[in-house]
Image: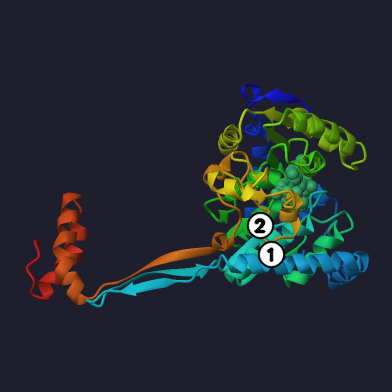
Amino acid sequence: MRIIRAEEYALQRDTQQSYEKEREIVQDILARVRQFGDQQLRSFTRRFDGVDLTDFRIPEEQYEQAYKQVSQEFLTALRKAMQNIRIFHEKQKRESWQYAQPDGTILGQVIRPLRRVGVYVPGGRAAYPSSVLMNVIPAQVAGVKEIVLISPPTSEGTLKDPGVLVAIRELGISEVYRIGGAQGIAALAYGTESIRPVDKIVGPGNLYVALAKQAVFGQVAIDMIAGPTEILVIADDSADPDYIAADLLSQAEHDPLAASILVTTSECLAKAVQASVEQQLADLPRKEIAAASIETYGAIVLVDSLDEAIAMSNRIAPEHLELQIEDAPSYVPLIENAGAIFVGPYSSEPVGDYFAGPNHVLPTNGTARFSSPLNVDDFMKKSSLIQYSKEALLRDGQYIVTLAEAEGLHGHARAVGIRMKKEGVEGKL
Ligand SMILES: NC(=O)c1ccc[n+]([C@@H]2O[C@H](COP(=O)([O-])OP(=O)(O)OC[C@H]3O[C@@H](n4cnc5c(N)ncnc54)[C@H](O)[C@@H]3O)[C@@H](O)[C@H]2O)c1
Ligand SMILES: N[C@H](CO)Cc1c[nH]c[nH+]1
Ligand SMILES: [Zn+2]
């Protein structure tokens, strides 16, 4: 892992390719499923997933089989994580509000859950049970009545990871379909004979899934499109180099495009982390992925002060930020941009990935400057409430007429003026 000075460092990942060819493929898949429904869905599932399905629903015995395949320890840990994630997200829930004015006018905001939401669960090696929890629980807390989950089948017609099936069952999701890729997104967005369309689609997936989600946006809402994961650690002399190396590798093992960055004031720590990364890489089962990520996008950046480290982190706006510095909590108010902030030596990033409660679906690629972690609000929508009294309209009407006429919108002016006139108040009509 290279050690460099701050002036030499810039995080540059080519994540903005245009993918013209793949876009065309996706457009074609979307159009066909939209036109031909189930029949086309079946045909794409045969072509891409190698299985002929008459019914897209997951048969009950596959859940029973999955429970036999996971360990009791897994089940216990999953249930505890679910509890924590639910408690955390319950705190995010907002209620409708309104206020009345003395003239009888009532103004407010009505907050409602989305009616029907689709969750995509990837089919390959990145089918994480933890991601099922992180996408579904906020929707449940929001009060979404219909949560539909889709995931591509294996050639045997089941889901690859029994842990995912167990997570689905533990969450009580009953509408689950064995479909994936762009054809799955099309079914969720447009509906088919056997699948009713949803209002919003969330969840990670490969390039075809991401492009399909982008393409159906407008027809339905979508969540953010998550890019490759990233972790930035700010550390000083007081930090343990083995902890930092382990945390950097925890994200590097996700993806060769993952970025793991240490920003430190200590040259001594930098060298120790560098050595520890080498050592810990050696016995990591996913070492090829982690090594590629560390080599290309990993860096240990030397800075002169913690202020400089924080300024750099605020510029990068990392998905995950760890503060492994003395008196770490006192630096939190200085952090302007980060998806999640992990404070102190015992808040290792995987604590947030799996268990603490906050969501692990976080803004990547600098978007923490303006985006937030997936949360309960993402599954709710607001309506404004305007209940004007007669007294208020007669009092304010002339202002509204004036503003409407200034915009040349006489129909608007009349809609208010006509009421004033009928009530015997001289509006300028
Ligand atoms: N779980 C998470 O939290 C998480 C987070 C970020 C990203 N991811 C991403 O999820 C993705 C998982 O990818 P995956 O492929 O294993 O599963 P996936 O479910 O995303 O995609 C599988 C589907 O892709 C479609 N497909 C594959 N090749 C195609 C082709 N040539 N043309 C048209 N469609 C094609 C098929 O329909 C197939 O069913 C990875 O890219 C990973 O980075 C996961
Ligand atoms: N670190 C990933 C992106 O925040 C989420 C994840 C799932 N499983 C393990 N980690
Ligand atoms: Zn992770």
Mark 1 or mark 2, which is nearer the start of the sequence? 1
Residue 225 on image: x %, y %: 62, 46
Ligand 2 within 8 Å, label 1 CB: no
Marks 2 and 1 sit apart, C-alpha to C-alpha, by 7 Å
> Which picture quadrant has residue 377?
bottom right
Residue type at the position of mark 2: Asn
Asked if residue 232 is positioned above or below residue 201 in the image, the reply reads: above
Q: Give the label on residue 359, or none.
A: 2
Give neighbour class at mark 1: few <14, some 14-19, many 20+ (Cα, 10 Å): many
Which residue has dot 1 on it?
85
- Helix, strand or loop under label 1: helix
Residue type at the position of mark 1: Ile
Q: Quadrant of the C terminus?
A: bottom left
Residue 177 on image: x %, y %: 75, 63
Is residue 344 rendered to the left or right of residue 389? right
Tell me what residue is drawn at x 61 percent, y 22 percent: 7
Q: Give the label on residue 212, or none.
A: none
Q: Is residue 279 visible?
A: yes
Residue sitting nearer the eye, 322 or 159 = 322
- Helix, strand or loop under label 2: loop
Is residue 276 rendered to the left or right of residue 103? right
Asked if residue 67 is positioned above or below residue 408 in the image, the reply reads: below
Tell me what residue is drawn at x 17 percent, y 63 percent: 414
> Which picture quadrant has residue 242?
top right
Tell me what residue is drawn at x 54 percent, y 44 percent: 334
Residue 393 on image: x %, y %: 19, 70
Q: Are marks 2 and 1 in contact (CB under 8 Å)?
A: yes
Tell me what residue is drawn at x 59 percent, y 40 percent: 317
Residue sitting nearer the eye, 305 or 118 = 305
> Which residue extends farthest top?
8
